Every structure is written in C-alpha cells, then in structure tokens.
C-alpha cells in the first residue's frame, strides 16, 4: 500500500511576527524625552528639570523619595508600609543612566531609585504661577 509520506501532516503553524518588527517603541502616552538640563537645588531639596521645547519642572526630594520604584520600596508599599523613612530628605547625588533615566541618591542613604524621564515628568509639576 503506497501513500504519500507526510500527506496527513498538519499544515505548518503560521509564522509568528517577529517581536518588535514594525512596532514603534512606546512606553506611555508621552514619548521619553530627555531633559535638556537636570540639576538639584543647592540645598538638595528639589530636582529641577528643563525640557526641550521649553518648560521647567521642579519636584521635591521628599516626593521623589516617596515615589521611588526600586524593588525595596515597591515591596514596602505592597506591604502597606511607607516607602520613605525620614519625613524630609535631600538629594545628595544625581546621575543619568543610559540616556533614559536618572539615578537619584538621597540623604537617608537610599540610592537605588531610578526615575525614567516620563515618570519624572508625571511627578514634576510646573512651577506655580505664571
Ligand atoms: Zn527605593
């Protein structure tokens, strides 16, 4: 009895589209625009960012510390504990990371917080008044 080898094989599965092909990299409603200037105030109490196209935002060190998304702080929040220790902290160091975020060190010794530009923008409110 002759039969065609493979005649009752299932058709080959469709080739899945390769990840990333034809897709646009998007991380949120706003594209990740790096600030043209990023500095802390002399006393370290605030982080000031100047954005391309104009506009300057400022966010307090304490607010940044509370919003820290590192594994440790995320776990603390999940347990219902406050993320920050001291009520008031200062920024002791800032360092850009890979052109997409900034690593911020705080006066309470915490230095694991990484703040992507888009996240920074959502935290930072434009200076009051105009
Ligand atoms: Zn943290």
Image (spheres, grey):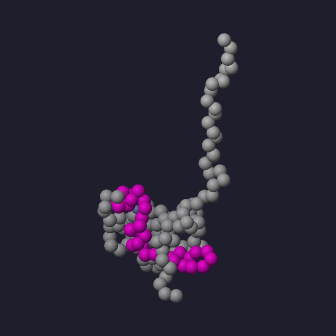
- Residue 64 magenta-highlighted: yes
Residue 72 as seen in the image, left or right of residue 127: left
Viewport quadrant of the N terminus: top right
The answer to whether 56 is drawn above or below residue 84 in the figure is below
The answer to whether 96 is drawn above or below residue 53 in the figure is above
- Residue 55 magenta-highlighted: yes
Q: Residue furthest top?
A: 1
Looking at the rendered structure, the number of numbered marks drawn on it comes to: 0
Residue drawn 35% across the image and 74% down it: 88
**23 or 46, nearer to the observer:** 23
The answer to whether 78 is drawn above or below residue 4 in the figure is below
Name the quarter showing ligand 1. Answer: bottom left
The spot of residue 33 in percent (x, y) is 59, 68
Residue drawn 50% across the image and 79% down it: 126
Can residue 7 be seen in the rendering of this structure? Answer: yes
The answer to which quarter of the image holds residue 112 is bottom left
The spot of residue 30 in percent (x, y) is 56, 67
Residue 93 as seen in the image, left or right of residue 53: left
**118 or 19, nearer to the observer:** 19
The answer to whether 116 is drawn above or below residue 8 in the figure is below
Residue 12 as seen in the image, left or right of residue 105: right
The spot of residue 14 in percent (x, y) is 63, 39
Q: Residue furthest bottom?
A: 130
Residue drawn 54% across the image and 63% down it: 28
**53 or 113, nearer to the observer:** 53
Can residue 95 be seen in the rendering of this structure? Answer: no
Look at the image and give the residue range highlighted in magenta.
48-77
């Amino acid at each position: 009895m002759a039969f065609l080898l493979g005649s009752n094989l299932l058709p080959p599965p469709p080739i899945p589209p390769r990840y990333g092909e034809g897709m646009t990299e998007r991380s949120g409603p706003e594209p990740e625009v790096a600030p043209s200037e990023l500095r802390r105030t002399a006393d370290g109490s605030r982080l000031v960012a100047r954005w391309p196209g104009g506009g300057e935002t400022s966010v307090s060190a304490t607010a940044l510390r509370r919003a820290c998304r590192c594994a440790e702080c995320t776990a603390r929040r999940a347990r219902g504990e406050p993320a920050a220790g001291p009520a008031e902290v200062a920024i002791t160091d800032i360092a850009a990371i890979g052109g997409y975020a900034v690593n911020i060190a705080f006066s309470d010794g915490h230095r694991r917080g990484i703040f992507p530009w888009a996240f920074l923008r959502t935290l930072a409110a434009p200076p009051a008044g105009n």
